[in-house]
Amino acid sequence: MDVPGGPRLTFRVLGPLQVQGTAGPLRVPPGRQEVILAALLLETNRIVSTSQLVDLIWEDNPPETARTQVQICVSRLRKLLVDADGEVALTTRPPGYVLHTGAGNVDAALFTGLVRRARSLGEGGDREEAVRLLRSAVTLWQGDCLTGLDSGPLANAARQLNEERLAAVELRIRLELELGHHDRLVGELQRLTHEHPLREKLHGQLIQALYWSGRQAEALEAFRTARRYLAEELGLEPGRELRDLEAAILAGELPPPPAPAPPLVRGATASGPEAPDGGPAALDAASPAPIAESIRHETVPHQLPADIADFVADGQRLGTLEKALSGDGRGTVGLAAITGKPGTGKSTLAVHVAHALAETGFPDGQLYCDLRGTTAAPATPVEVLGRFLRALGIPGQLIPESLDERAEMYRTRLSTRRVLVVLDDAAGEGQVLPLLPGSRGCAVLVTSRARLTALPGAHRVELDVLDEDRALELLARIVGGDRVAGEAAAAEALVRTVGRLPLALRIVAARLAARPHWTLASMVQRLADERHRLDELAHGEMTMRASLSLTYEGLAPEDGGLLRLLSMAQAPTLPSWLAGALLDDHRPFPSDLMEPLVDVQMLDVAGVEPSGGFRYRFHEIIRVYAREQLAAQHPPDVRRAAFARMAGGWMHLAEEAHRKVYGGDFTVLHGTAPRWRPPSPYADEALADPLAWLDAEQAALCGMVGHAAEEGLHDLSWDLATSLVTLFEVRGHYDLWESTHLTALAAVRKAGNLRGTAAIRASLGSLYMSRNQYDTARQSLNSALDVFQALDEPMGEALCRRDMALIARTNGDDAAALELYRRSLADFGRADDVVGRAIVLTQSAHIHMRQGEIDLAQKQLDEALDIYEGIGYAGGRARTLRRVGQVLLEQGRNDLAVLTFTEVLELCRDSGDVIGEGHLLRDLGHAFAMMGRPDRARDFYDRAVSSREQVMDFSGGALARLDLARLLTDEPGRSRKLLVPAVEVFRERRMTRELAEAERLLGAC
């Protein structure tokens, strides 16, 4: 619903209570102030008495000072809303208070208005529009009304809204059935009847949809299912409507389905006909989306691994963990730790509990990270925080370097959200503490082999072996209940023999499931033959080795060999092509090599790749066991050759990803290490979206840089590190850029590899420039340039001079920059690198534009665009088009500039470039200001402020605030509110020119 000129604050109650201000989410102090604000929002523009508020907070036992405390809370809320510059008024109206705000400012009011309008349209015959409005209304919901708010009386009001939501869904489905859309509604209705089994109207709609879709038997089965639910839960028979529906189907008297309605052709809207391309309406197409719509698009991470179907639950333990994660009523972050020895199911339990709580308890998302605490290289808190911040919508370029700053940004991002954080396999408390949120709305679930006794406030659950009943239940779920019941005594003996350890039990059960002709008694006998090893089964460490050896010894020789070689891989999950590389097998479906290991649970299936291939995962204990066998059975030369093929496969794919991003093998140096080519269909499908592949394989690729260095493959180590800059630069992974390069640098130095050393130093120079560390960057680039000149390496020289020119340009030395650009162009020409040439042309054109040489700048930009369009490099085209827009502004061709900026804005949005989007919004503000359209300019500057500050780019936000303040000289109050925080940012970042202007404008307010 459009809200032209709407208020600056938006409120959400359809889910967790949220307030969105001009600068992002607004934190309402938890407790009494939340309850009061929620009550006022549910009664927007109507009086809520003080007595009602007292009852909502304290119910039957208010203190003597209750009314005074309510007055204090209202006063604080009023100040909070005024400080946020909201067009919202909280006024005193005897006998209580009124929150005055527009209907488009509260999601509940928006929802009610949309449903009311939809009902009217449906009754008037416009079912298509009514359905559209009802769908829009339901999308406003982010969970049950006022999720997480602690007030019994408010919960009753929330239940009423929840009921209205379901009623709106039922109305929309009724209208769609009347439109003849029955075939597309079946799946949705099956889900809804499962979620709300006692709602007879939904069951009736499912029965109709199935019958009209030609599925008569399933329609009758749906009626029987509904009857069973009602009988079991309420002891009642279905109502007359459902019974009549069944009778009509059995008698063949149900009317035929409505014919699908023809699409409604809608002409010009009330705002006028469409404008031709390039007209005023085309310029206005970039206008900001209504605030009521924009609050729907927050980043909600869902990172949990898949739950497992055969999980054996301990109801009491699950309840204890769920209570601990809800904060246990203490008003603090819910914190629980699952500990125990290997193989007891810590991770499985954590993921299961997290899935159970995810939707209702933590609607704002779930973060997950394997902390690798039992490996030689545990994840650092800095690394994990960087990952989590990206998942929460912060661009990599804006994530700070230090642990403290990342932790502060992380806590700020979570302060108004209900997010569950799962930290798997923690090494100790020091790894966990920086990852704890500060908001009581969040919760953290940790697993570890350590006891974590120094983790403050944690509820600890220590896992041991399964009791006999649950062990038998797990065995039955894997091999089949009939099989276990038929050999009850043997089943009991089997679970006792393996010590009731979950992993050991899963392994032997998998062998039985794969061999249905084996009896359980025969498996017990096989285990009994290893009596001495089974004696140690009850004593911890030898338990897993004994159980694993039973499965390992049953493997075919080729499967055992692959298991051993796979243990060299250090990636969190393993793509199927690794099997082909390790065995030098080029079959088109390399997952066929992995599946025999999955059958006996020596490997787990971790997921499906976009290419359709599977990903696999070792249990860490199985990996350790396989490594022992590797050292014993494979000579060093065989291990080295297999590792080189595996590393060469990663290198080939990373190289291909770079080529696909840039349209060719441009702007990068490569080494001479041999590649191994995965099967072409696999590579083509996996790299269909090369940046997505690089993102997904980031951990494996970065790990391979270090692993290759350790194995002496220094040429591949530096080559892979510099190829990954394609990812690091676009996503802002500056910490990974540095760590991989320093690892590779140590390897090439040790090997005396001059070319590799220079390549790494040149790439580090680019990194230091991105961090504004220009002196360090210059030193690194000069050092690399000396070596490249000695080696007569034109590509290396070109890259160094290009970056040195950018440093000179940043420092205001345009003459030096242009000379370096001239020489860089010549170097790129010698290297036959057209993308390098286009980058230099785009950068130097900016200098010519500043110097008033517009024709020359335009000529260079045109050539760069021709290059990018010829090879299909979208990122380069977007950056060059932005410069074209700036040139058009300089020429006074403002309409074309706006259209150009709008095109680039869409490119940024399509690629997820949030920082680029902020730049373009500001560019559009400049354009409309120059066109004498201050209202449009204000809109775009406003959006630029919001866009930059939402991702915590406060310097970018301060610049947009300054732009906006220049246009608001007639509104001194608002200008002051814009400028005060901007001055603080300029002063902190030492932006002296901007600081001087902001202080001047502030003095004039």
Image (cartoon, rainbow, N blue to C red):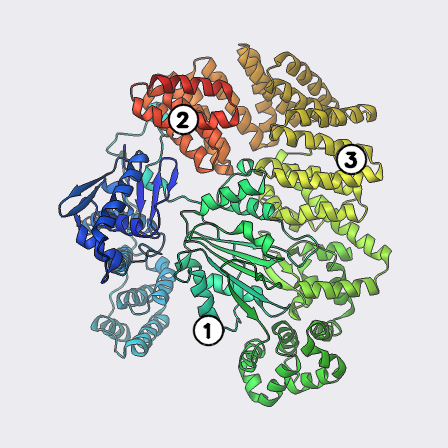
Side of 51 relative to 678 (left or right):
left
Q: How many marks?
A: 3
Mark identifier at residue 961: 2
> What amino acid does circle 2 point to?
Arg
How many other residues sit within 10 Å of disc 3, few (<14), some (14-19) or many (≥20)? many
Q: Quadrant of the N terminus?
A: top left
Mark with earlier residue (2, 3): 3
How many other residues sit within 10 Å of disc 1, few (<14), some (14-19) or many (≥20)? few
Q: Nearer the viewer, residue 395 or 222?
A: 395
Q: Nearer the viewer, residue 224 or 159?
A: 159
Q: Residue at x 45, y 61 (%)?
A: 325
**Mark-to-mark CA distance, 2 and 3:** 45 Å
Q: Do the numbered discs 1 and 3 sit on residues whose CB atoms are within 8 Å? A: no
> What amino acid does circle 1 point to?
Gly
In the image, residue 505 lies at what x, y percent? 63, 76
How many other residues sit within 10 Å of disc 2, few (<14), some (14-19) or many (≥20)? many
Side of 544 relative to 247 (left or right):
right
Q: Which residue of the protein is positioned furthest toward the front in this rendering?
A: 64
Side of 822 relative to 330 (left or right):
right
Q: Quadrant of residue 923?
A: top left
**Mark-to-mark CA distance, 1 and 3:** 58 Å
Q: Residue at x 77, y 31 (%)?
A: 758
Q: Which residue is mark 3?
A: 756
Q: Quadrant of the C terminus?
A: top left
What kind of element bears circle 2?
helix
Q: Which residue is mark 1?
A: 315
Q: Do the numbered discs 2 and 3 sit on residues whose CB atoms are within 8 Å? A: no
In the image, residue 220 lies at what x, y percent? 33, 73
> What amino acid does circle 3 point to?
Gly
